[in-house]
Amino acid sequence: MLVADDQHVVRAGIAAILDAEPDLTVVGQAADGSEALALIAATAPDVAVLDIRMPRVDGLAAAAEIGARHPGTRVVVLTTFGLDEYVFAALRAGAAGFLLKDAEPERVVDAVRVVAAGEALLDPGVTGRLIQHFAAGPGPGAAQRLERLTPRETQVLTRLARGRSNAEIAADLGISPATVKDHVAVVLGKLGVRDRVQATIAAYETGLVRPGVV
């Protein structure tokens, strides 16, 4: 993996925590997004841990570039800034994880492992704020995004957005977890999103799922 942060002590500390794990290897460190992009092109890490505020190319711009140019590298944003505009911008840029720097080291290690495995992980305080952000309902043209989905795919997306696991969705719908996994992959493709976090955002943006409705 790669760690990018403009503060040398912070960057080195995060790298040391991750590199100490037997199943994790830090292949590079960068002081800004531009360096991070160059290193990713050279080393193709599974995960890039990015700060948001960095000189030249910040973490949000770097995350978007990584998603466009290096889809095999997944992004975890680790920052001191928990402001909503940063959270939403990071998720829309393609980040699969978002944690604050006051998180316990074990939480950071866990986030990297989860994201490397193809899943997504958010700071506990982020999910609630994400839902509140979309409480006003869908925007114009939102329904067109859902027209691409079959009724079964819509059922899967609805449950996914409510936080259910593949096994729970399978039990709800009377199908196998493997079938759910296939449906999830198709849903992500039709919506043009990278992971379950972005699919959840799409479900709220379109009004398919509403805050407080089970």
Image (tube, rainbow, N blue to C red):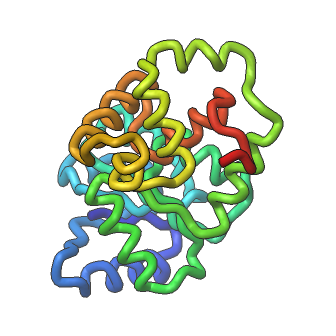
On screen, residue 85 above or below 50: above
Q: Is residue 214 left or right of residue 45?
A: right
In the image, residue 60 above or below residue 117: above
| Closest to the observer, 12 or 140 | 140
Q: Position of residue 172 (x, y in %)?
A: 43, 46
Residue 98 visible to an observer of this rendering: yes
Which one is nearer the viewer's eye here, 50 or 24? Answer: 24
Residue 164: percent from the left, percent from the top? Answer: 47, 53
Instruction: State the residue at coordinates (52%, 54%).
Output: 163
Residue at 79% x, 42% y is 135
Relative to 13, is 128 on the left or the right?
right
Indicate the quadrant where residue 188 lies. Answer: top left
Where's the N terminus, which quadrant? Answer: bottom left
Q: Position of residue 59 (x, y in %)?
A: 52, 52
Q: Residue at x 39, y 29 (%)?
A: 187
Tell me what residue is drawn at x 64 percent, y 53 percent.
Answer: 87
